[in-house]
Amino acid sequence: MANLSPLVKTAPETKKIATASQYTDTAALINYISDHLPAIEHPLSEAATHHFAKPGKLLRAKMALKASTHLDIEPSAALPWAAAIELLHNASLIHDDICDGDTLRRGRPSVWFKYGRDTALMLGDWLIALSFELAGEAAHRSATPLLVKILADQMKLTTVGEARGLDIQRTIDWEGYVDLAADKTAPLLTAPLRGIMAMHHGNSEDDDASMTVDAYFRCLGSAYQIANDILNFQGNDGAEAQASDLGRRAPNMVTLIYRHMLPAPEQMHFDEWYRSGCNSALDYWQDQIIGSSAMKTASRRMHGIFNESGRLAEELPVGLDKVIYPLHLMVKQVCEKSVVALSVIRGDFGQ
């Protein structure tokens, strides 16, 4: 197979552009977000300060700012839009940690683990409210009221994806899982560009361009999710325990592929255990899955989806390939990391 993406060929030029603006964008974003967090006397101040002490990569916000530079959008409108996306993303992370019971976020105690579930829930809600406030400010400054609808639509899609993943009684097929993965990851990657493009088009959207952006990020998000699924079974995804997805019955492509590989009687046995929620046989099923070819099969499917994202990237509006390049490269690296231990296909990734 070829390299994961033809975009890698443009790395020198794009990396230079990203490096030139990275410090300014990061500093402006962090300062802007910090200025809008709860004041010291606010009951959520300590929890918010703790969470944003490590703000993450800010990839979504940086995409919005880079796109705004390319499309000549005023910084006074672009910055609140970029911050709105980043705040909504962080709200989703705080709520996800509650749902998943994850005690760590970015190498530090998660908000719910340190301050309790109630505080984490309220902080997430507060950040959602702030996100829409800033989206409204961006809409006012750019005369683009459509921004608020874009943000709401993408948030609803993300929520649907997360909700689908909670039903352990529901059996899904390959296509259903890819849709679920895309719904969870793609909307808040799509929103930064959709918003900037709406500002550029005068409070309207280019339907063809928007569809291409949506399709691109759905492929990229699905590939990223499958890579994380593989890493989870390898114990390399940052979770507290290897194959933690299996133990908490979280949707995982490796688990799905393994299930479909089983003969009918054994599949029924696995389904009974999985739906029971009981972990008495967890070690057995974990060993069975890890010893099977499920991870290799998942990696091949991941590779196909990632290649499709590279094809779609070439169809993006002119110049947006440079905007999405840092994120595209990061996902490529995660995909490559997920196959390091799968020696049979390492060569397929040009390693």
Image (cartoon, grey):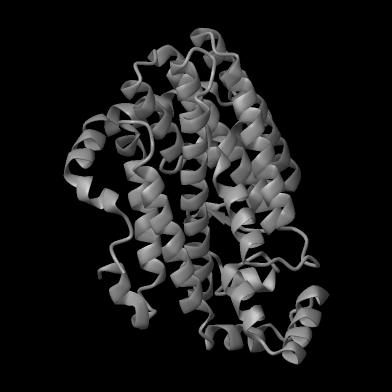
Q: Nearer the viewer, residue 311 or 172?
A: 311
Give the residue furthest to the front: 208
The answer to which image quadrant residue 146 occupies is: top right
Residue 83 visible from this viewpoint: yes
| Identity of the residue drawn at 75% across and 76% down | 274
| Identity of the residue drawn at 35% across and 31% down | 26
Q: x%, y% of residue 182? A: 58, 51
| Identity of the residue drawn at 72% across and 86% down | 281
Q: Nearer the viewer, residue 104 or 150?
A: 150
Q: x%, y% of residue 189? A: 50, 40
Looking at the rendered image, the quarter that the N terminus falls into is bottom left
Residue 238 visible from this viewpoint: no
Q: Nearer the viewer, residue 343 or 58?
A: 343
Q: Nearer the viewer, residue 213 or 108?
A: 213
36, above or below 239, in the image: above
Q: Tell me how many marks there are.
A: 0
Whether residue 122 sits left or right of residue 333 in the image: it is right
299, above or below 107, in the image: below
Q: x%, y% of residue 72? A: 34, 16
| Identity of the residue drawn at 59% across and 46% down | 93
258, above or below 64, in the image: below
Q: x%, y% of residue 213? A: 47, 38
Whether residue 307 sits left or right of residue 231 in the image: it is left
